Image (cartoon, grey):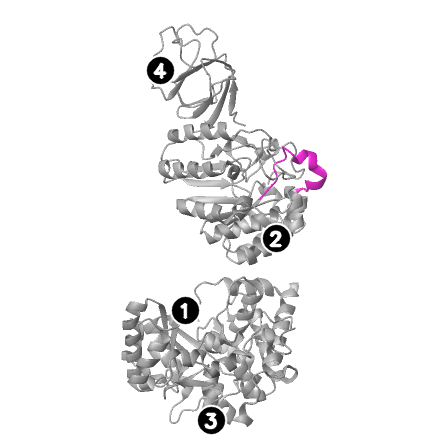
Amino acid sequence: MIPLRAKGKARNLESSVVKRVTRTDDSDNSSVLLWEKNQGHKPLSNSLGAIITSASEVAQIPANLPIIHDVNRMDHLSDGDVVALHPNGMVETLFRQESPHNALFITDRCNSNCLMCSQPPKDRDDLDHLFDLNMQLLPFLPRHTQELGITGGEPTLLGDRLYQLLSTIKQSLPETEIHMLTNGRLFAWKNWAWKLAELEMNRLMLGIPLYSDYPAHHDFIVQAKDAFSQTMLGLHNLARANQRIELRIVLHKATIERLPQLARFIFKNLPFAEHITFMGLEYTGYTPHNDALLWIDPSDYGNELSEAVHFLDDFGMNVSIYNLQLCLIPKDLWRFSRNSISDWKRTYLDECNRCSELGKCGGVFATSRKFSANIKAI
Amino acid sequence: MSTADIDKSINLMFKTPSRSITMEFQGGEPLLAFDKVQYAVLRAKELNKSFEKKISFVICTNLTNITDEMLDFCKQHDILLSTSFDGPQFLHDKNRPKSGAASYDLFVAKLEKSRKALGHDRVSALMTTTKLSLEHPIEIIDSYLEHGFSSIFLRPISPYGFALKNEKKNRYETEKFLDFYKTGLQYILQLNDQGTFIIEEYASIILRKLLTPFSVGYVDLQSPAGAINSVIVYNYDGYVYASDEARMLAENNDFTFRLGHVASDSYQELFYGEKAKKIAEVWANESLPGCSECGFQSICGADPVHNHATQGDPVGYRPTNSFCKRNMEIIRFLIELLNNKSLNAEKIFRSWLTINERSQ
């Protein structure tokens, strides 16, 4: 797993700042220099934006520059990455230049509380702080960035400022595919969907989860009353406003129950969805606590998955399978499988090293605390 | 049809609130009055410069008299040819006698010629089922395949016009048609299962309603009925009819569904007049006895013209109604096939519904 955080001690940092990583010391104010303690004694330029160093002695460094010193690691950072330096000494990676999996993190808050949430919501008001970081981050993103996610928590909780953020993205990254993960519930307000339409971002795709064709069942899985109705209304409002929609279905014991029915429901009621993804479970966050409700070995739901995927595919819908290892799904589903696990949390098990299909397989979540017992080299 | 009546008909046609129009030329044999067809196509295209609707043109023809010049015109204006083909030679010739020439051979030659000129999928075929056809579903389907069609419409003969006159020849029991239909459909499924792609059109119309969220623009299975709502017939004598079947009734001096005349009646009088209002009372199966409580209501349709023609009453009496009997059994049969997992029918049916470009 690629670390996205480092910890040190901050000096001259009153509030969080966002800077681009560099290892050359003649850079400008927007850059943060990574400085090793054995790099010599030449005084450093005053024009730098900030410094991160593993050293404790900071004599060569201009007195008022923001610094995080005694940092525990820097090897995970590359030139061009963008980091936030926090007053508590945390160096947080916001953008990795080599990765196709970058995202703006909007909030830890959520208006749902899904049984299988991999990143459980926290009840603290982080909206202002994260909005500020994201607005600082955006100017750093290269125009050729292929894809950028927007995620949380629930990004729509940002309210009007979400549109401000999107509008900035549209200006600065006109060529980038934007992929926002949302539960879609707030789009039950029609004007929310129209406001999105007004932005005219044809590269924006909304990834919205739907877990059952049966309202009470969906509401139970997301632990929120009336969520099904709100999401369905939201989906239809978004479709009316000509927005692009991806439906996301996390696969676990509770969703497998009605998976073929859900596929039929989707085709009959949401035929405008541009993409439908069936996603293997990331065994972390709430999931271990709800093991009895959720765990089913993926090799035990091949039939249900096959029926759902082929039904939608037969009707010409665009279907993908995410996060499932090739050895766990029927071979006729391989063509739907995508390497979906973000690079920074993708790994392979020892068993995988003997597998002839390793090159095609998307691996497993490094964050998962439980794997199928049936992962076997092919 | 007089030029004046053509002009008035086209003016009326453009009054439709619909954004897309199909302008279909029927006869008799439209190719025998091809100058009128040309005039009408050019006139419609000219007017459409200001209306900007999506117009498709269709000529219903037996192809017998088609010439290179006609094909050039069709090619130039993207006109689809809809022709009649009844299957194997003995059947086609018997159903469609033409004095002095072998109807089948001529048809095959003209079909080839037309396809070459317009493109394979720009010539479609419809079959008419007669008493004789009923005994040969397999041969008919094989014959369609032999001539390069990848779809066939197994349809019953209509109880109107010419067919009605040949009562002895053509009036057969709905039961017999259903046997014919089921044998044919099962054979078609078998062909598909073995890798030969061929669609049965009537099944695919019903299946689209059953299995997909999309609407079907098939006039015989709509509620409110297709008559007036999705089709209107401007006859050669300038009279306006609620549907093609309504026009056929008039050939037998039954003018029940004649809405008026292009020369003397306005759009308002034709489409919202007393006749139209009367038809509107019986054109929705939601309000017809026997249909209002039927489980197949949303898949089926209302056909007041058929009810009138066969039962003397546009409301119709469902227990002995052939439209009802035929559709209920076909729908039931299709659902039975869908539920029979061993037949692979559902998979095959889906492939019929997702095909984008149909080559007929």
Quadrant of the image containing the C terminus of chain A? top right
Q: Marks 3/4: CA distance? A: 99 Å
Mark earlier in primary sequence (1, 3): 1
Mark 4 Cα shell of 10 Å, populated few (<14), some (14-19), many (≥20): some
The amino acid sitting under disc 1 is: Ser
Mark 2 Cα shell of 10 Å, populated few (<14), some (14-19), many (≥20): many
Pointers 4 and 2 in contact (CB under 8 A)?
A: no
The magenta segment is A279-297
Pointers 4 and 1 in contact (CB under 8 A)?
A: no
Left or right of B44? Residue A236 is right
Which residue in the structure is indicated by mark 4? A25
Dot in front, 3 or 4: 3
Q: Chain of mark 1?
A: B
The amino acid sitting under disc 3 is: Asn
Where B54 sits versus B36, above or below? above
Residue furthest right as drawn: A292
